Amino acid sequence: MSRFDVPTREQVPAESQQIFDQIEQKFGTLPNLYAVLGLSPVALQGLLQFQPALEESSLEPREVQALHLATSQENGCDYCLAAHTMLGTMAGLDQATTVAIRRGEVEDPRLRAASDLARDLVRNRGKVSDDVADAFFDAGFDKRQFVDAVALVGAKTISNYMHNAVDFPVDFPEAPALETATR
C-alpha cells in the first residue's frame, strides 16, 4: 500500500506543473515517479538534470541499462525494474538478457562487468572490491567509464529509494519475476 497517493497536477507546486509539461511533451505521459517527485520542485528538477546528463555518459546505452537493471534489482525496486526492462529492450537488450543481468548471470563480458560493479556498489555502500574493479577494467572499460558508472548507480539509487519509500504504483509493463537467483 502506498504511503500516499500519486499527486495530481493540482496538488503540486506551480514550478513542478511547468516541469510536468516538459516531461509530458517528451514522453507523452507523466510517469508516477516524476509525479511524486513533483511534490518538491527542487527534487524533480535536480533528478531531471542529473539523470539525463548521465545518460550521455561514455558508456554504451546497453551498458547504462545493465547498470540500471542491476542497481534496481539489488535495491529491490519494482518500479525501476519495470522501466529499465522496457528501456533496456529499446537499447538493444533482449528480454532474456535483461533477466540474466538481474540474476547476475549475463554472459557478455562488458555487461557482466558493468552489472557486477553496480551490485558491488549497492551491496557495499559505495565500496568496490578489487576483484570487481579489476574485472571492470579487464572488460575494456577505462577510468572515465568507471566514474560514469558510479554516478549512474548513485542517480538510479535515488529513484529506487523514492519508489521504495513511497511505494507508488508501477506504470510500466511489469518486469518478469525472477526465480531464486543462482549466483
Image (cartoon, rainbow, N blue to C red):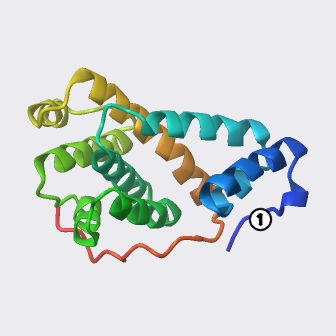
Q: At 48% across and 45% down in the image, what residue appears?
A: 156
Residue 10: which quarter of the image? bottom right
Q: In screen coordinates, is 98 left or right of 72?
A: left
Left or right, residue 107 beside residue 88: left
Determine crowd level at label 1: few under 14, some 14-19, many 20+ residues with C-alpha closer than 10 A: few
Residue 158 in picture, x, y percent from top left: 55, 44
Question: Residue 73: x and y, percent?
Answer: 38, 59
Foreground residue among 122 and 79? 79
Q: Secondary structure at mark 1?
A: loop
Eyeballing the image, is 145 above or below 17? above
- The residue sitting at 28% across, 46% down in the picture is 63
- Furthest toward the top, the residue is 143
Asked whether, in this view, residue 162 is left or right of residue 43, the answer is left
**40 sits left or right of 109 in the view:** right
Q: Residue 120's x, y, as percent? A: 28, 42
Q: Nearer the viewer, residue 10 or 134?
A: 10
The amino acid marked with disc number 1 is: Phe
Classify the position of the C terminus by image quarter. Answer: bottom left
| Residue 77 x %, y % | 48, 61
Write down the residue under mark 1: 4
| Residue at x-position 50% and y-position 33% | 53
Residue occupying image coordinates x 40% and y 37%: 125
Looking at the image, residue 1 lies above or below residue 23: below
- Extreme residue in the front direction: 25
Q: Is residue 169 above or below residue 13?
A: below
Rendered-image quadrant of the N terminus: bottom right
Q: How many marks?
A: 1
Q: Nearer the viewer, residue 88 or 39?
A: 88
